[in-house]
Image: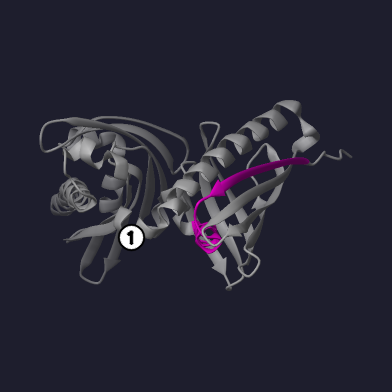
Amino acid sequence: MTTERVHTTAHHVDVAAPAGVVYGLIADAASWPWYFPPNIHVEQLEFDGRTERLRMWATANGQVRSWTSSRRLSPSERRITFRQDLPAAPVKSMLGTWAVDAVDTGNSRLTLLHDFTVEGDDPDGVAWVERAVDTNSRSELEHLRRIAESWSRLDELVLTFEDSVRVKGGAELVYDFLYRVADWPERVPHVARLDITEDEPGVQVMSMDTTTADGSTHTTESVRVCFPHAGRIVYKQTVTPALMTAHTGEWSVVPDETGVTVTSQHSVVLREDAVETVLGPGATVSDARRYVREALGRNSLATLELAKRHAETSVRML
C-alpha cells in the first residue's frame, strides 16, 4: 500500500484594500471567472450559509480541468477552508485555506495555502501539479489584488446584460444551432474564422475571429461548457479584446407551452486604463460601457435571430 507524501505550497499578496473587501471577493466563488484568469465557470451545488459545494472548471497548465470542492466559510475570522471532493488526475487529494489578515483599516494581506497528494507520488505528476498550483495561485492573487484595489469603482467596471428572442420551434433545434459552433463561419456573418477542439464531450476550446461594424477584426479565445439537458452553454473568453479584462456569458434555451425563449447573457469587466486607447482621448468608462453593450448586444442578437430562423425553418420543412 502506497503512502503518498503531502506537498505544501504557500502564496501571499499585499492588497491596498480593506480586509472585508478582499474576503468578500474570495467568498463569492460564482464570480471568480470575472476576477481569476484560470477560472472558466463555477456552479454552486449546495449552500447552507456556512458550507458549500462547488463544481469548478479552470485551466491548469493550458488544459481545461474540472472538479468538485467543498468549502467552509468563516467570515468573522476571514478564513475559507476548501477540499476537493472529486479531484482531477493526477491529483489524489487537494485541500487548502484562503486567509485574509488586516494590516490596517485600508490594507490587508491575503494568503493562499495548498496541501496536495498525487497518486503514487509520481514525480512527473507532482511536478505538473506544483507548476499548475504555482502558476494559477500567482495569477489569481495578482488579479484579485487589482480588482480589490478598484473595489470602490467595481459597479462602474462590471457590466452585465442580456438579450432574448422568442422562437416558434423546438428547443433542441435552437440548442443544436448554438452548440454546433464549428458551423458558425458559414452560418453567422460576423464570424470570419473559428477553430475548435472538443477533447472532452461538452467542453469546447475555441479561437474565433469576429468582424465588427466598422470592418475591423477581433480575435478571441474561449472555453465553452455545455449542459444539453439544461439547455445551457456557459463560456469565458480566455483572450479578450483590449477593452476588457474579463468576459463571461451564457446561452440559455427555455421552452414553455407556446414556444422557446433563447437568451444571451454577458458579464464584462472593463479595462479602465485601455478606455482612451481604444475609444480615443477623453473617452470615459461610461462611453466604454455603452460601446461594449452595443457591440456585444448587436452580435448576440444577430446570432439569436439566426438560431430562431434555423429552428423555425427546420420546423416548416418537416
Residue 157 against residue 224 in the figure, above or below: below
Q: Residue at x 76, y 30 (%)?
A: 122
Above or below, 209 relative to 304: above
Label 1: element kind: helix
Question: In the visual, does 260 lie left or right of 120?
Answer: left
> Does residue 18 show up?
yes
Q: Residue at x 15, y 54 (%)?
A: 312
Packing grade of label 1 (10 A; few <14, some 14-19, many >=20) is few
Image position, residue 191 (x, y; %): 21, 35
Q: Position of residue 76 (x, y in %)?
A: 63, 70
Farthest left residue in view: 214
Residue 8 position by quadrant: top right
Q: Nearer the viewer, residue 50 or 191?
A: 50
Horizontal side of 227 relative to 166 (left or right) equals right
Quarter of the rendering occupied by the N terminus: top right
Near-viewer residue (17 or 81): 17
Give the magenta part as a residue range.
7-29
Q: To which residue does mark 1 refer?
A: 155
Render colour scheme: one colour
Q: In the image, residue 123 lies at what x, y percent?
A: 75, 27
**Residue at the extreme front of the image, as rendered:** 104
177 in relation to 159, above or below: above
Query: What residue do we see at 22% from left, 52% from top?
Result: 289
Q: Is residue 170 visible?
A: no
